[in-house]
Image (tube, helix red, strand yellow):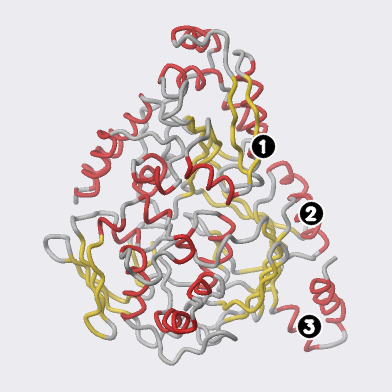
Amino acid sequence: MRLWLCGLLTTLLLAGCDSGNRQLANESLLYCIEGSPLTFNPQLVTSTETLDATAHQLYDRLLEITPDSQHPIPALATAWERSEDGLRYRFTLRPGVTFHHTDWFSPSRPLTAEDVVFTFARLIDRQHPYHGVSGGRYPFFDSIGWHELVSEVRALGEHQVEFVLSRPNASFLTNLATDYAVILSAEYGQQLLTAGTPQLIDQQPVGTGPFLLSQYRPDEFIRYYRHPSYWRGSARLAQLVFDITPKSSKRLAKLLTGECDVMAHPATSQLSVIKQHSELALSHATGMNVAVLAFNTEKPPFNDVRVRKALSLALNRADILQAVYFDIGSLAESLLPPVSWGYHPNLLMPLPDQDRARWLLEQAGLSQGFEMTLLVPAGARTYNPDGLKTGQLIQRRLGELGITVKLLSLEEQILRRELLEGHQDAVLTGWSADTSDPDNMLRNLLSCQAIAAGTNASRWCHPLFEQQLDLALAEPQLVRRIQHYQLAQELAFQDMAVIPLVHSLRLQAYRKQVQGFRLLPYGGVALHQAYKE
């Protein structure tokens, strides 16, 4: 057992004898997560572990989305207005918002328009001193074409900032509310430039969020302390520790013994065990997510739609739902789940049909089968709790057609690099959207721009699909936007761009004395209001 954890447990054991120790134990929360963050800047990644550990703990966004109405509401921006032509958005910033005071940075001023300009100029201006830092890739923003959409971001005063767009975009406000649209400190950025260490902006973070980073040991733990001057009010937790424990069985053991207060991503096979313990509870949220099997449509034989349709007919998705998800979720008929306002109710994936699958392979000249490699993510994802087990079920079904499937399990960073290079045969992947806007999921999974961003794993690029997405963004009327998104889904369905598998529920297990934390409807977890009774 790690020394730091032993020390904290000792504190917990001594709590009955010392009121100070009891208070420390009550004001500390240990959160068991599966993996280390790839960075402390959500703009650079799409990994669930990174977003959970950083987006709502360290940072804030200009706007937030209400779960019920799906409308944007104030956060760091208190008000906004749009020009009649839809090309200019002007935001008024909240006064008196303080940045973190850390061992590596002492802010001299509160949040201003300069910080917003710095944050978003980094994304769109290739000459910006920070654009190329940490690799120069911003997967979410690259996949939605942010650098082409936003022409300029400029300060109109200390607390007023304006975005100038190249064209109207109905998803612009919701994109500013995503986990990726966090606001950084321009003053901190300048300090690091002067010191010649700009890369530290993504490794030693400074934000305006409810917690600030105190200590990080890769593959062991992250320790946060509360931000005492947080604009929403100081967090009730004095200390928040993310315990990094890759194996789900070990995370559950720690939850049962009290070494962890909250367990992220419990395996569906563990739910019955959790429900048997009176001191434990489960929380779940219906997420905007989908797990997919993506074949590389640029590479033979997967560039033949007959092959892709044959492989879809060979799969038994119901088996995957039962064996991997334990029926905690629903079969995906299209990319968008039924909770999305852009959901297409008339698309239905065909039932398994091995005979028709063989016939299609014969028509494609592949009656003898072939060999392929299927990349699977190591560990759990929000949209797929066990990629390896899903891969094994696919391997068995395709084997019945004479297709030899080699499974290759890869960590997130390596998998992302493989997808950027584009040499893969197929990959088990998916997407968890953090807004209800259909564009968030459809564009990141299947747009042409998302190929270069590494989120379009099938590398499928269809001009008519792109056209429907663009028409939807330019359309102010919701009914017509829905029509465009449904036409886009029909095109992807007919071409079998990817094989949708399952929409999952997001799960967390926790000890019942933990109150006030919540799974966000579209991704992430908020701990600002968490406390222990």
Residue 130 x %, y %: 40, 70
What residue is disc 1 on? 388
Q: Name the residue under label 3.
A: 22
The one of 7 and 525 positioned closer to us in this rendering: 7
Q: Earlier in the sequence, mark 2 or mark 1?
A: 2
Foreground residue among 419 and 439: 419
Q: Residue at x 37, y 25 (%)?
A: 495
Which of the pair 372/244 is nearer the observer? 372
Q: Residue furthest left?
A: 84
The reply to whether dot 2 and dot 3 touch (C-beta < 8 Å) is no
Kindly identify the amino acid type of the residue bearing the numbered disc 2.
Lys
Q: How far apart are marks 3 and 1 (CA)?
A: 42 Å
Q: Nearer the viewer, mark 2 or mark 3?
A: 2
Please give left or right for residue 410 compared with residue 251 in the image: left
Q: Which amino acid does label 3 sit on?
A: Arg
Q: Name the residue under label 2.
A: 250
